[in-house]
Amino acid sequence: MAQVLEFKLPDLGEGLTEAEIVRWMVEVGDVVAVDQPVVEVETAKAMVEVPCPYGGVVTARFGEEGAELPVGAPLLTVAVGEGADGHRPAGDPGSGGGAVRAPRAEETGGREQTSEGSGNVLVGYGTSQAPARRRRVRPERRASGAASGAGAARAAVSGVASGAGEAGAAPSGRANGRVRAAEPVDGPVPVISPLVRRLARQNGLDLRELTGSGPDGLILRADVEYALRAAAAQGGRTAAPEAGPRPTGPVREHASAPAARTAPSTVPPGGIRIPLKGVRGAVADKLSRSRREIPDATCWVDADATELMRARTAMNAAGGPKISLLALLARICTAALARFPELNSTVDTQAREVVQFDHVHLGFAAQTDRGLVVPVVRDAHARDAEGLTAEFARLTEAARAGRLTPGELTGGTFTLNNYGVFGVDGSTPIVNHPEAAMLGVGRIVPKPWVHEGELAVRQVVQLSLTFDHRVCDGGTAGGFLRYVADCVEQPAVLLRTL
């Protein structure tokens, strides 16, 4: 007999608590193999294809494209075991009452579909073994069209009695949006988050009595609050939420939504409201935290970059891969951090310690259509200018295509920000929490400059360093910035560290 397993949105790592569904890669009734990608989601870090740890028939999907789901919310259910493979549940779109082709060996990598998981994990969920006990889940909302062999298979995978597939009967057990008392539903009721479930429990509300307004009948916080207001009005008492019409549009819920009523907004009405979510929301949270926690200071200096530009021209004229200016600046940064390791560190606030790193994972700011991201070049101190150029190009291309992984966006120890590409001379960068410093580079432009005692037109750049004042004093920060400026003005200074 088929066994229905529920696959929930896994922990995608790096403290991410939610993801937006970008594209479903399977339909209800499709046969999936173990570890087959079933949905593409977008987090605050990157686009991720999520593989399903079970092989069998997809019996339900939760959430439409564009919907946000918290970690732990149901993604889909899969019927595994005997009677599930090779059959599409009757009554689903595109079924035609027939059978569905099982995946060929080359599509499944030669693996047999079993009720066991793959043993592989994404982050935070194990797939080594399917649960030993059978589980009954929320019945399908669509009415079944026949009591044939396919209808029997649907009854097996959805936990509905075999007679529920008769003509005129709704196997979902619902009538006019309410669960019929004569046909109670076993198993958990699909709820958007544990906080919503707790809100209902604290107020003595039976979730089985509700009709979810979310995708596939998912019960949202708004559904619970609406039911509580209705119950309060009938009982003659005042509920916490103000009485009003039930929302009919889509409502996005978050796992971190407080159970209590929040204070009214002080923002005046009108204007265009743009949600702070995804990359923009992650950037806002990180910058706000940096300003709250890090006592930063900024120092800056103008430098003559004429010799650095000549050195780059000579390198590229010698043949081989072209060397980028960003790679040369990164090489200067790693050399400077070797001399001033205080700036390649972080502050452990709980232990009240400054942690200095023996490696440089160099982040660099990259502007994309999705917003500002900071890819990280691992072990930048061990790479030469050619290797740095290639890695910068690879990460930049991946950032613009939205293919960066969470691991490529985290773990930096120092950040290089070339805002000169925007045509500006200077800035006061905000430290990329939890790092301790960031070097900003403005545009390189011809300016009057005193060179060897005479006024000349030289290529001048402004360098700025924002640093965490807890890790060092101004003398260390000034020494670092002065060394960087010396290397920009006289690239031969770098030869001492090669």
Image (tube, rainbow, N blue to C red):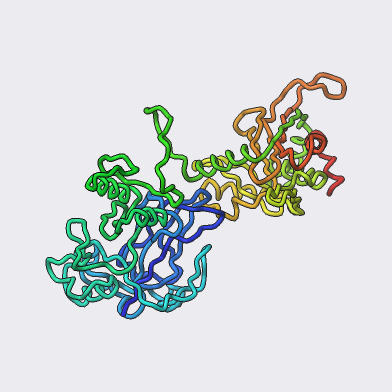
Considering depth in this image, is 484 or 17 the residue closer to the camera? Answer: 17
Q: Give x and y (percent) for residue 406.
A: 56, 54
How many badges with numbers are in the image? 0
**Is residue 301 shown left or right of residue 157?**
right
Residue that sits furthest to the front in the current view = 236
**Is residue 307 shown left or right of residue 61?**
right
Residue that sits furthest to the top in the current view = 455
State the residue at coordinates (73%, 22%).
447
**Is residue 96 shown left or right of residue 303?**
left
State the residue at coordinates (70%, 45%).
414
State the residue at coordinates (65%, 46%).
434
Considering depth in this image, is 358 or 391 the residue closer to the camera? Answer: 358
Q: Give x and y (percent) for residue 258.
A: 44, 47
Does any portion of residue 107 appear in the rendered image? Answer: no
Q: Quadrant of residue 245?
A: top left
Q: Quadrant of residue 240?
A: top left
Q: Give x and y (percent) for residue 451.
A: 83, 24
361 over 431 or under it: above or below: below
Considering depth in this image, is 464 or 425 the residue closer to the camera? Answer: 464
Q: Give x and y (percent) for residue 39.
A: 41, 59
Give the quarter of the figure containing the N terminus: bottom left
State the residue at coordinates (74%, 31%).
299
**Is residue 484 shown left or right of residue 397?**
right
Q: Quadrant of residue 492?
A: top right
Residue that sits furthest to the left in the current view = 168
Does any portion of residue 73 appear in the rendered image? Answer: yes
